[in-house]
Image (spheres, rainbow, N blue to C red):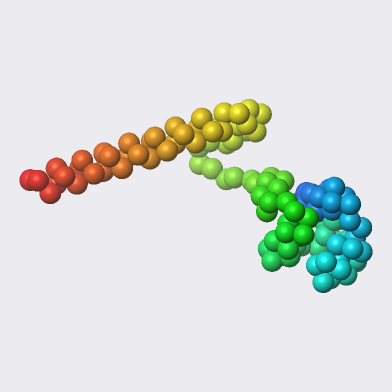
């Protein structure tokens, strides 16, 4: 919780909803009508004072013509890791997003290599 008592995740998500609504040229009242809810509910979502359920978020994304990840990627995920090198890697990738694809390709190679090693080990065990 932050100093205002609002959940930071809700506040970040609310800002994304507000921005997408404005980009779509919709008022809170009109978005509420399209979502079959109230203007007050939209106001609370945007202010981060009310949690947005996944069903509602999916409808918001559909109506505002945004992919769901537009809203979810705005949320900072706190990772608790045993190895601080992983946390450092995540922080570094936030500063260098162009490296993400390369890292994912390398990760796929590591997974493939591990599968090959496991397959070879199984052949050795089965062949004895």
- Residue at left offset 82%, top offset 71%: 36
Would you identify the image quadrant in which residue 55 lies? bottom right
Residue at 70% across, 48% down = 70
Q: How many marks?
A: 0
Q: Is residue 57 left or right of residue 23?
A: left
| Vertical comparison of 40 with 84: above or below | below
Residue 105 percent across, percent down from the top left = 46, 34
The C terminus, quarter of image: top left
**Residue ID at (85%, 47%):** 23
Q: Position of residue 51 (x, y in %)?
A: 76, 62
- Could you say where residue 125 lies in the image, as x and y percent from the top left? 14, 46
- Please give left or right for residue 72 compared with residue 103 in the image: right
- The quarter of the picture where residue 117 lies is top left
Residue at 73 percent of width and 57 percent of height: 61
Above or below: residue 87 compared with residue 123: above
Residue found farthest to the left: 128
The single residue placed furthest to the bottom in the displayed view is 36
Mark yes or no: residue 1 visible: no
Q: Is residue 26 visible?
A: yes
Choose top left, top right, bottom left or bottom right for residue 44.
bottom right
Q: Nearer the viewer, residue 116 or 81?
A: 116
């Amino acid at each position: 919780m932050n100093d205002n008592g609002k959940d930071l995740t809700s506040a970040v998500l609310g800002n994304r909803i507000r921005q997408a609504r404005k980009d779509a040229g919709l008022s809170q009242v009109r978005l509420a009508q399209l979502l079959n809810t109230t203007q007050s509910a939209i106001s609370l979502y945007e202010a981060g004072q009310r949690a947005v359920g996944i069903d509602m978020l999916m409808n918001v994304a559909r109506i505002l013509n945004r992919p769901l990840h537009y809203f979810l990627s705005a949320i900072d995920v706190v990772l608790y890791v045993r190895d601080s090198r992983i946390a450092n890697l995540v922080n570094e990738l936030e500063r260098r997003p162009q490296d993400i694809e390369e890292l994912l390709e390398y990760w796929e190679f590591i997974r493939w290599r591990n599968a090959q090693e496991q397959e070879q080990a199984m052949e050795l065990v089965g062949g004895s």
